[in-house]
Amino acid sequence: MGKKSRVKTQKSGTGATATVSPKEILNLTSELLQKCSSPTPGPGKEWEEYVQIRSLVEKIRKKQRLSVTFDGKREDYFPDLMKWASENGASVEGFEMVNFKEEGFGLRATRDIKAEELFLWVPRKLLMTVESAKNSVLGPLYSQDRILQAMGNIALAFHLLCERASPNSFWQPYIQTLPSEYDTPLYFEEEEVRCLQSTQAIHDVFSQYKNTARQYAYFYKVIQTHPHASKLPLKDSFTYEDYRWAVSSVMTRQNQIPTEDGSRVTLALIPLWDMCNHTSGLITTGYNLEDDRCECVALQDFRAGEQIYIFYGTRSNAEFVIHSGFFFDNNSHDRVKIKLGVSKSDRLYAMKAEVLARAGIPTSSVFALHFTEPPISAQLLAFLRVFCMTEEELKEHLLGDNAIDRIFTLGNSEFPVSWDNEVKLWTFLEDRASLLLKTYKTTIEEDKAVLKTHDLSVRATMAIKLRLGEKEILEKAVKSAGVTREYYRKRMEERAPLPRCEESDLGLLEGSVGDSSLPLVLRNLEEEAGVQEALSLKEAVSKAKAAENGLVNGENSIPNGTRSENENLNPEGSKRANEEESSGSTEEAREQL
């Protein structure tokens, strides 16, 4: 069996020579909280802010000399985990935990397992959930702190820390088998993060680091001063290293499950099952409410001795690197974010906004360019078609015969608005992707050469692969857009008849462009409003007429970039799923952090 619950102290930083008082750390964390609560810096200033925050974090880490860890190696505790799981109703037959070197630890079949065979189940009592957090020693503080209440991932991270610090915790056999550190950007050295500069993912990396530092600083003060925190096992030792570990453990492993009554979802850590590594395929895990357990069927046939994989979902490599700490080669679901919007100075803005509203698309959103062909989704095709419409085409979609049918088929590649519109939108896309390619400091060839000739760390390799992958997607998009543009230019020159959209009953997302099953969420980036207001038809047409008379004027411009809204600990990129939070109190709490 594995070693029992012995703990030892270990340095979490370097250079510490004396014990530091809680008051000194409190002062430093107050300074960190103030720095992390400042407004988002302007373009070109994010790196400078990141370095400043990192410097403060490192100062705190060096002064927090000691951190508690388990004695021995991670794998020493695997037998205890299997015994504990078996005694509490989980399946433990047919697989074992093995180190697969580059992929890390995973499950290996000890017998032949057939595709769709139920081979793994874990009952609720073994799961660490937000509900079990409420019923733990964390409960009194949870009942008082709005951040813990609003953000389940943070509550789960503190639940994990409290249980880790309690030798008699029910979950000790599981916690002892968790990694001691991770390969998420929270653990990157500064030079490794530098490899991600100019990428579409860098803003999310900055946000992750800043938010984690802000959360730590906030909760350090809470733990030292809140009366309900006095009995927590973290009272005398809550280091940044502790919090980074807990955050990463949750971020790379959390999953949604239904609550006991099935009325809503909650977040959970699922022992044993979270040892499975990722491959392409379909989701094969579900929750059986009748038996109250998480169940997983085999993705494919697995022979004895083979690694057992599961499919984490349709995630981009940026999501895998930032939230899971690995890069997945040949990821067919890889994509690059692109922010597009209709300028309010566009004289046709009102009409375009109304057409987009009827199609359920905001006037400004984060879209994606895809690794696969075609490079754009039905939603992005619809947006670009409206963006490039003439006034007459807009009127046809607002006032013309079969206007509703025209709206429904905006995202269907089989029914162009006009040949000229198709030429314009694909020309625009080609130009925009070309401009994004020019923002990178290295070329595709240079990245490939670095990967071949340099002795890189695992994390630096991931970073360079990520930026190379982004450029390859953009390059594919440029080539695809150019070919498609020329196709429609020829159709226009040939005066080919347009397909009649009114003869089709295909809906907006039923076209051949993109994979409509991809869980792409169009996020409104309007600064002043979270919800786009649809204009009435009369308002749209009247504003368009006003524009004709010179009352509204301006260049037809479009903002571009890849920044998304500020995110919390892990808003959308856990290892396998994310917790959706929509209450007003949640948004207010996020503003605090």
Image (cartoon, rainbow, N blue to C red):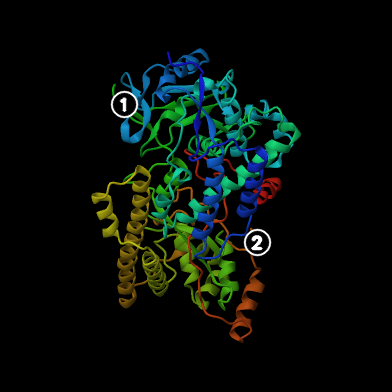
Q: Is residue 353 above or below residue 517?
A: below
Residue type for callout 1: Phe
582 or 588: nearer the viewer? 588
Residue drawn at (59%, 17%), measured in percent from left and top? Answer: 168
Residue type for callout 2: Ala
Residue drawn at (54%, 67%), measured in percent from left and top? Answer: 403
Q: Residue 107, image x and y in percent?
A: 37, 26
Which residue is tagged 2? 529
Q: Is residue 139 above or below residue 461?
A: above
**Is residue 410 something one can see in this rendering?**
no
Q: Is residue 141 left or right of residue 196?
A: right
Q: Residue furthest bottom?
A: 549
Question: 10 Å neighbourhood of mark 2: few (<14), some, or many (≥20)?
Answer: few
Secondary element at tag 2: loop
**Is residue 114 something one can see in this rendering?**
yes
Circles 1 and 2: CB atoms closer than 8 Å: no
Q: Residue 285, image x and y in percent?
A: 46, 31
Disc number for residue 302: 1
220 or 476: nearer the viewer? 220
